[in-house]
Amino acid sequence: MAILGTLLKRGIRLRESLEQDYTSPFDLQKMELRKLLITAKDTYFGRYYHFKKVLNGFKEPEQDLFYTYYKSQVPIHDYKAINDEWWSQSREGIKGVTWPGKVKYYALSSGTSGAPSKYIPITKEILKSMQKTGVRQLLAMSKLEIDSKYYETDILMVGGSTDLKFNGTYFEGDLSGITTSQIPIWLQRFYKPGKRIAKAPDWDSKLDEMVHKAKQWDVGVIVGVPAWIQLLMEKIIAHYQVQTIHDIWPNLKIFVHGGVSFKPYKRGFEKLLGEPIHYMETYLASEGFIAFQDKPEQASMKLVLNNGIFYEFIPFTNCNFDLSGELVANPETLKIDEVEEGQEYALLLSTNAGAWRYLIGDVIEFVNKKETEIIIKGRTKHFLSLCGEHLSLDNMNEALEKTASQLNIAVKEFTVCGEPCGSLFAHRWYIGTDDPVNQGRFKRMLDANLQALNDDYRVERSAALKEVLVEFLPTSIFYSWMSSLGKTGGQNKFPRVLNEERQVEWKTFIERKRNPTY
């Protein structure tokens, strides 16, 4: 990365980064929405929701009137709403549905509404935005205390296959596969594992090829999901019979990660290193490159305000979401200048890929409003994602219902928690049933049904999610625990995913039921 090393040595920054530093968040976001609306005003979506009328609000002296117009004309959409009415038409090859032109790529992302995957449009405009934000993050590395010579090494990007499926109308595949296939020319010389290996559709064979090539590379930066990178490093260390990954890649200095929290991985990850490295977090979703870690000494990420995304924020409270995480009618929505530090918000995105007031499902919190620095807090609905499996409550319910039907048993309650399994992970299911059942058969069928429903879960079952454990309990145990918490009655529901604190309480409660002297 000689070019990058030279730029970092000189402290070069992109105009967009400087623009964000010296312009108010409100002004940046107002300009961003205006550009989006102007570009899309003649699309089917733009005409249906009167974008030209909304644009008139930008001419008024009252600075907030544009937003009043926008939210009064355009409803909030979740995936099902915008896909059923709009994006599904775009996938049929119709041009200009929610964004001008024909959409060439769709990123597959785990669905929560019955389908195995969601299809998220990836336009050429949002690809350029993602690339530009990626370069901004690379240039932010100048803040790290690293000699510029280390930036002349290779960048290893471990992601999905770049061998995208074409159905005659559009290409589909993992976002990482789509973006990797569009790597800028100046970066291709330093990009590893290279186009041939990146194109391999099978993860195991790709992993083996990277292991065999590892000694030929001088990797200084690794980009990827923690679980996959950890597996790769473990295989490399075992194959070459060395102590740490630095015995193979002595110049490794930076790990850029995203997709899941890195906290559970850090202890095991660092056992594979010969010396400390720098960790930089990204918030890159199929819907856009939302934020990245701008300061090495802080865990927060800087929200990108001037690169193709307009944000709205819904306070994540009982006033706006029900107990299942579903959005209520007419929720409160806020602009960037109206948020407060320490409050959790669900994100709405309007993007240059044709998403409009789109509920992405993530919950964030501002830790520094002035610098628009955020942390990811979780999801609006129950889910489990230890290593990128993104298992939603809908997935759990549907798989469990199908399994119970196949075995002709009644499952009245259940809960799931994640736990360590050696250096990797496991899901432990607690099933409330009073019917006799074969534990091994139930486990195999449940696992198979989950893999059929959720692509990410299926991938991780051959990677970091090594085990699925099932325990059967009388239904009365679940009810007794709720009673012990003072939460009985129809309005109180047993939590389907247990956090760490609840796991301890639940396991202690079960043990006491089994052994009263415990």
Image (tube, helix red, strand yellow):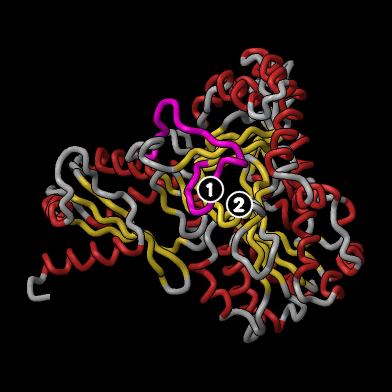
From the image, which quarter does the C terminus lie in?
bottom left
Residue kind at label 2, given as amino acid type: Lys
Instruction: Find out whether the residues at labels 1 and 2 contact each other: C-beta distance under 8 Å.
Output: yes
| Residue at which label 2 appears | 369
Looking at the image, can residue 436 be seen? no
497 and 16: which is toward the camera:
16
The 10 Å Cα crowd at callout 1, few under 14, some 14 to 19, many 20 or more, is some
Picture coordinates of residue 345, whole percent (x, y): 50, 44
277 versus 397 height, above or below: below
Question: Could you say whether the residue bearing mark 2 is in a helix, strand or loop?
Answer: loop
**Horizontal relation, residue 503 to residue 225: left or right:** left
Q: Is residue 371 magenta?
A: no
| Residue at which label 1 appears | 340
Residue kind at label 1, given as amino acid type: Glu
Question: Could you say whether the residue bearing mark 1 is in a helix, strand or loop?
Answer: loop
298 versus 429 height, above or below: below
Examine the residues drawn in magenta and state their main secondary structure. Answer: loop
**Horizontal relation, residue 147 to residue 245: left or right:** right
Q: Point out the tag, 1 or 2, that comes first from the N-terminus.
A: 1
Looking at the image, can residue 252 be seen? yes
| Span shown in magenta | 325-346
**Horizontal relation, residue 454 to residue 160: left or right:** left
Picture coordinates of residue 98, whole percent (x, y): 67, 23
Residue drawn at the location 14% of the way across and 50% of the way down:
479
Picture coordinates of residue 279, whole percent (x, y): 65, 69
Q: How many marks?
A: 2
The 10 Å Cα crowd at callout 2, few under 14, some 14 to 19, many 20 or more, is some
Mark 1 and mark 2: Cα distance apart in space: 7 Å
376 and 174: which is toward the camera:
376
Q: Quadrant of residue 484?
A: bottom left
Q: Is residue 344 magenta?
A: yes
